[in-house]
Image: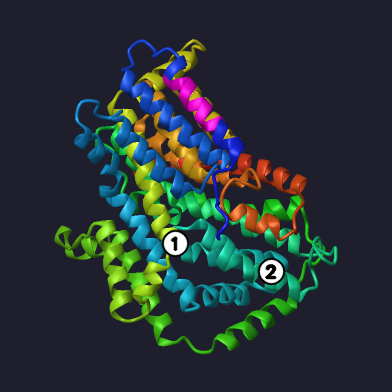
Amino acid sequence: MHKLILPRPLPTAVVVCLTLIIWFAVPVPAGVAPNAWHLFALFVGTIVAIIGKAMPLGALSIIAIALVAITGVTNPTKPAAALADALSGFANPLIWLIVSAVMVALAVTKTGLGRRIGFYFVKLFGKKTLGVAYGLVFSELVIAPVTPSNTARGGAIIHPIMRSIADSYGSSPEQGTQKTIGRYLALVNYNTNPITSAMFITATAPNPLCVALIAAATAGSISISWGQWALAALLPCLVMLLVMPLVLYLLYPPEIKHTPGAKEMASAELAKLGPMRLPEAITLSVLIMMLAVWAGVPAWLLGPAFSLDPTTTAFVGLALLLITGVLEWEDILKAKSAWDTLIWFAALVMMATFLGNLGLTKWFSLTIQGGITHLGLDWKASAAILVVVYFYAHYFFASTTAHVTAMFAAFFAAGIALGTPPMLLGLLLSFSSSLNMSLTHYATGTAPIIFGSGYITLNEWWIAGLVMSVVNLLILVGVGGVWWGVLGYL
């Protein structure tokens, strides 16, 4: 018999007790409907279960959908309507944008295009250690727009390249030589990931969730497009990508400063890959097409009639890869991360949406607003407090999705109530939702992969994360604030 894989006992017990306490023992606040409070109890239980890893995220999401449907918290009088509400998240186009983009990204790995791009940039910049670092940075930047899994991008594509370079110089944790070059490159490898994740809606799964929450909070008056997001992130994030390797170079300098062999190693790896094959060429062409449409190039050149919805574009790209045989249906069926994303994204979007519809988010935001109002600060200082608290609260989260779902809507609503321009606040919180992944070795799925390789100690990781968080926030506010004013987003 197969061994039963049950939920982890301690986290599960905490989740059940906390949910029941909020549901039955905590008085419903004035101005909040009982069913809204009960949905909040289920929501808190789900978030705590995610943080405590009581079960896999997808399994928890299925349970959450079932509980919303069976308890009728969204529609107490009509069971059929409650079920429709529980399943409503699956109709969100933003969810399907990420799911289809994850599937498209399979072709980058399957064809070897990702490795080719990575080694090409190492060959281009690889004369010095700092140049190798920038090679890794630009490699990830190139594939970020079409790789919604930041874990796959930083951990499965770029990290093996980084390790190959470190190994070629005899730098490994096993030999105790990680400080020669491996530690520095591993830190750059990881700290690139949060920045590229912030640059594009399609660079990490929680980004569309931020867009959806902003649109819901503003009744659709602010609906950030793929192009708007990318343009808003362009200058501040490029500055971060240029500054980050320098900061880490000063903080944890590598013992090897010159890497004459890196270019040769990259050339050798490219030689093994051989000339670009037809599947790679097709994949590259499809990716360029998708990026052009997402950026609005056809509409700009030919008129609005040639614009295409971002989700439709992703589906067209996926269809082309299937038609040309670059991807097979078996590849799609095996895309566990895509189907997993579909399930958990739908559940969390559904719960967050109905918390807003039932007035719970408004009540929570008014509570936060009241606490800050007593300080007598203007909207700029109030917004700074909200962003800093939101950013560093990620020390308590092992999932960016859980963090966004738990805190984004309430902090955004509170900031608007305090007078912060909605677009400014939306950009600050959205980009912070990715940039805060620099903080800990459990902040996102990429972190355990790189930390687990052993090049970086826990103290080194946390110090680097704290330093980079301050640097990135200063650049985001300073450079970003000026840039967004120029773009007219404020």
Q: What is the total number of numbered labels drawn onto the structure image?
A: 2
Q: Closest to the observer: 60 or 361?
A: 60
Q: CA distance from mark 1 to mark 2?
A: 26 Å
SS assignment at label 1: helix
Residue shown at 45% from the left, 43% from the top: 60
> Quick one: label 1 or label 2, which is nearer the N terminus?
2
Q: Position of residue 341 (x, y in %)?
A: 41, 53
Residue shown at 60% from the left, 68% from the top: 135
Residue 19: say if magenta: yes
Q: Going by the image, does 268 lie left or right of 86?
A: right
Q: Is residue 445 visible?
A: yes
The residue identified by callout 2 is 163
Q: Position of residue 100 (x, y in %)?
A: 34, 62
Residue farthest to the front, as pictured: 1
Q: Closest to the observer: 452 or 5?
A: 5
Residue shown at 37% from the left, 19% from the top: 363
The residue identified by callout 1 is 336
* Amino acid at dot 2: Arg
Q: Which mark is residue 483?
A: none
- The magenta segment is 14-23
Q: Going by the image, does 247 lie left or right of 406?
A: right
* Amino acid at dot 1: Lys
SS assignment at label 2: helix
Q: Is residue 420 visible?
A: no
Q: Going by the image, does 137 lie left or right of 110?
A: right
Q: In the rendered view of the protein, which quadrant contains the C terminus?
A: top left
Q: Position of residue 428 (x, y in %)?
A: 46, 38
Q: Going by the image, does 306 lie left or right of 320?
A: left
Residue farthest to the right, as pictured: 176
- The answer to whether residue 178 is above or below residue 90 is below
Residue 336 in which image quadrant = bottom left
Q: Closest to the observer: 166 or 24?
A: 24
